[in-house]
Image: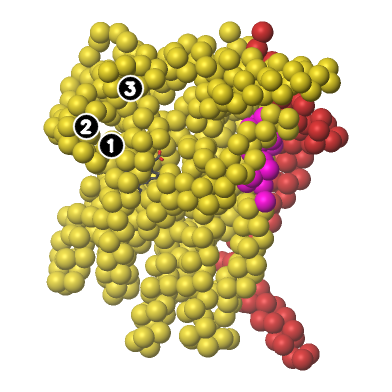
Chain colours: A red, B yellow
């Protein structure tokens, strides 16, 4: 029973250790995710409705207001 | 007049278009290269010839590079939905949020398991299981395109849902109708098969580079044979699926079809423009000629649009102002109905606020009568319903011309490689070298046709882009765009650099 998780662990460990070009790729993925979530998402792409309203009812009411605000 | 700043709308859509086009550099290559790796590995499994293993590993490395740089670039689109298209996201979020999240989880587990076996599992698992994992990666990658294309298909042809004014949301009425929406089906078949073409073109390009440099000749030739068989079959299939896509567009988005063909005055037995230069200053309803020059194949557009020679294909003018004889309601009439729908929607909102249930119910009943024209109520003029004809015509024709070229290119390379003459036909190699770029142009032109062609709609007939946008300051959107453009340009440079380096190392680098 213990053997299977240990085998899986060593499979991934050896896989990561023996990577060549993969090492560079992981670095790029990591930097990319960091920039995307810690910079872009946080400072440039806030979720407008989540940030400005507390409940779904308020969000629905706001959108309804937006889509009917042109009607006079 | 609708008081939305047009520059805000244009910057929001420019950013979205730029992100989507960037994302789409990597996706088609992933869709097709995964299958090519599976083919190469299956041949290795069947023959036991180590050269096929080297070939498989080489293309797998390039697949991995493409995947690593492309992965998560699509998430930016999701960010943009929340920031720049919040009205739209809210209105449809209920439907697509869950499937897209499930797809993300599915992709994660697939990548953590089969993907890991594919890259880490050589000599660790049996050959058969390794090959099976490669196939699973191919199938899984292609399946993960399903939901996003279903979502896109729904925006082009919103079926199977009803608008609930109380929540300001679309709610699912029929799951099957949404999933088997004919536009979604044709999108999936056309998109995946065009991805196969793209990847085959990529393999051909890299292999031709080796042949030109007289390096890794055996590997290049073997790679070419498999890629050209796949590319030839896929490019023929792309023609069929493209034809199906055009038929569906004609049925569901006739304005897009009219723009694709620069057809202003509808006609029976309409011809398909084989070649033409569009008059870019022509406007709907004026007397100018739509083309400076054009060559038409008689009757073919009628056949493509309705599967019937001699049938009527509506032009832009018919769709804008209506054509009673052909029973076509014009945008001008739909605008009137749309305005009624919006007035009743506003009345519903006010009645609800005032707690007058009876008035709310009456307004809702009136709204339901015209709700299918709701989006037209936002238009300022009927001409606003016409997409930019110059762009749509040219992108469609670029894609179709390239689409006719690919079977010829793959066929020629297959023929000369199998006959053992490819290294002598050096004049062919530069053509092969440029195929990946041509594939990329066709890919991007395809999405430009599909998306610019459906303007001004975010949801066909129900919501124009100017209503889907969040009311932000244009400057905020411009700053975000600039920031994002810098980050993603750097990423692209990194990908090209790593990819070229790996190609120049070649298969022996393993
Ligand atoms: C003769 C060949 C072709 C025809 C008739 C054709 C037709 C079409 C049509 C009508 C659309 C718009 C569909 C919509 O708006 O819903 C489309 C979209 C698209 N095409 Fe093509 N196409 C052809 C070849 C190609 C080729 C060679 C590629 C790429 C290698 C390609 C890639 C795409 C892509 C990526 C899209 C956007 C996704 C979609 O709407 O399905 N097409 N094509």
Q: Which residue: 73% across, 33% down?
A: B167
User: Which residues make up the magenta segment?
Assistant: B81-98
Callouts 1 and 2 close, C-beta under 8 Å? yes
Residue situated in front as seen by the camera: B354 or B48: B354
On whether disc 1 and disc 3 are found on a single subunit, the reply is yes
Which comes sooner in the sequence, label 1 or label 2? 1
The residue closer to the viewer here, B218 or B103, is B103
Give the vertical position of B434 relative to B301 (above or below). Answer: below
Q: Which of marks 1 and 2 is in front?
A: 2
* Residue in view at x 27 percent, y 18 percent: B325
Q: Earlier in the sequence, mark 1 or mark 3?
A: 1
Q: Rounded to the nearest whole Å, what is the CA distance between mark 3 and mark 2?
A: 13 Å
**Of labels 1 and 3, the one closer to you:** 3
Chain on which label 1 sits: B
Q: Mark 2 points at which residue?
A: B311
Determine if the magenta segment contains residue B179: no
Q: Where is residue B144 in the image (x, y as percent from the top left)?
A: 54, 58
Label of residue B423 in the image: none
Examine the image and state in which quarter residue B279 appears. Answer: top left
Q: In which quarter of the image is the N terminus of chain A?
A: bottom right
Disc nearer the start of the sequence (3/2)? 2
Circle 2: element type: loop
Looking at the image, residue B185 sits to the left or right of residue B490; the answer is left
Q: Name the residue under label 3.
A: B327
According to the picture, the residue beneath numbered tag 1 turns out to be B305
State which image quarter holds ligand 1: top left
Evaluate whether label 1 is on the same chain as label 2: yes
Disc 2: host chain: B
């Amino acid at each position: 029973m213990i053997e299977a998780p240990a085998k899986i662990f060593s499979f991934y460990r050896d896989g990561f250790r023996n990577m060549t070009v993969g090492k560079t790729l992981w670095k790029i993925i990591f930097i990319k995710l960091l920039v995307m979530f810690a910079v872009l998402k946080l400072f440039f792409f806030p979720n407008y409705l989540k940030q400005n309203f507390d409940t779904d009812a308020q969000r629905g009411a706001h959108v309804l207001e937006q889509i009917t605000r042109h009607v006079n | 007049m609708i008081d939305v700043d047009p520059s805000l709308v244009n910057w929001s859509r420019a950013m979205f278009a730029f992100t989507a086009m960037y994302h789409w550099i990597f996706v088609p290559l992933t869709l097709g290269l995964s299958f090519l790796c599976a083919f190469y590995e299956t041949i290795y499994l069947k023959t036991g010839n180590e050269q096929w293993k080297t070939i498989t590993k080489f293309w797998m490395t390039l697949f991995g590079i493409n995947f690593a740089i492309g992965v998560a670039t699509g998430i930016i689109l999701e960010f943009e939905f929340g920031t720049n298209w919040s009205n739209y996201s809210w209105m449809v979020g209920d439907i697509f949020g869950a499937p897209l999240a499930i797809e993300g989880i599915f992709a994660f587990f697939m990548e953590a398991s089969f993907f890991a076996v594919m890259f880490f599992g050589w000599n660790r698992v049996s050959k058969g299981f390794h090959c099976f994992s490669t196939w699973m990666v191919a199938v899984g990658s292609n399946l993960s395109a399903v939901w996003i294309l279903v979502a896109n298909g729904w925006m082009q042809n919103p079926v199977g849902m009803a608008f609930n004014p109380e929540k300001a949301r679309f709610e699912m009425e029929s799951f099957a109708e949404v999933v088997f929406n004919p536009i979604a089906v044709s999108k999936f078949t056309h998109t995946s098969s065009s991805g196969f073409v793209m990847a085959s073109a990529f393999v051909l390009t890299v292999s031709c580079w080796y042949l030109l440099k007289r390096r890794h000749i055996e590997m290049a030739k073997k790679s070419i044979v498999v890629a050209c068989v796949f590319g030839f079959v896929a490019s023929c299939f792309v023609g069929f699926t493209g034809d199906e896509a055009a038929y569906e567009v004609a049925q569901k988005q006739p304005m897009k079809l009219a723009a694709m063909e620069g057809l202003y005055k509808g006609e029976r037995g309409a011809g398909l423009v084989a070649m033409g230069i569009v008059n870019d200053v022509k406007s709907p309803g004026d007397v100018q000629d739509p083309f400076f020059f054009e060559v038409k194949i008689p009757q073919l557009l009628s056949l493509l649009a309705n599967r019937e020679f001699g049938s009527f294909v509506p032009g832009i003018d018919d769709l804008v102002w209506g054509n009673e004889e052909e029973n076509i309601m014009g945008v001008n009439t739909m605008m009137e109905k749309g305005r009624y729908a919006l007035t009743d929607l506003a009345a519903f909102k006010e009645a609800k606020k005032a707690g007058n249930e009876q008035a709310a119910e009456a307004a809702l009943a009136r709204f339901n009568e015209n709700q299918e024209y709701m989006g037209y109520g936002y238009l300022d003029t009927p001409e606003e319903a016409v997409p930019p004809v110059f762009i749509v015509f040219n992108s469609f024709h670029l894609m179709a011309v390239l689409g006719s070229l690919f079977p010829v290119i793959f066929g020629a390379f297959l023929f000369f490689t199998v006959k053992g003459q490819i290294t002598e036909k050096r004049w062919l190699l530069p053509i092969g070298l440029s195929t990946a770029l041509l594939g990329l142009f066709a890919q991007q032109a395809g999405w430009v046709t599909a998306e610019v062609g459906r303007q001004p709609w975010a949801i066909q007939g129900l919501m124009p882009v100017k209503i889907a946008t969040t009311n932000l300051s244009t400057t905020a959107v411009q700053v975000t765009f600039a920031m994002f453009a810098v980050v993603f340009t750097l990423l692209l440079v990194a990908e090209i650099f790593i990819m070229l380096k790996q190609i120049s190392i070649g298969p022996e680098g393993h």
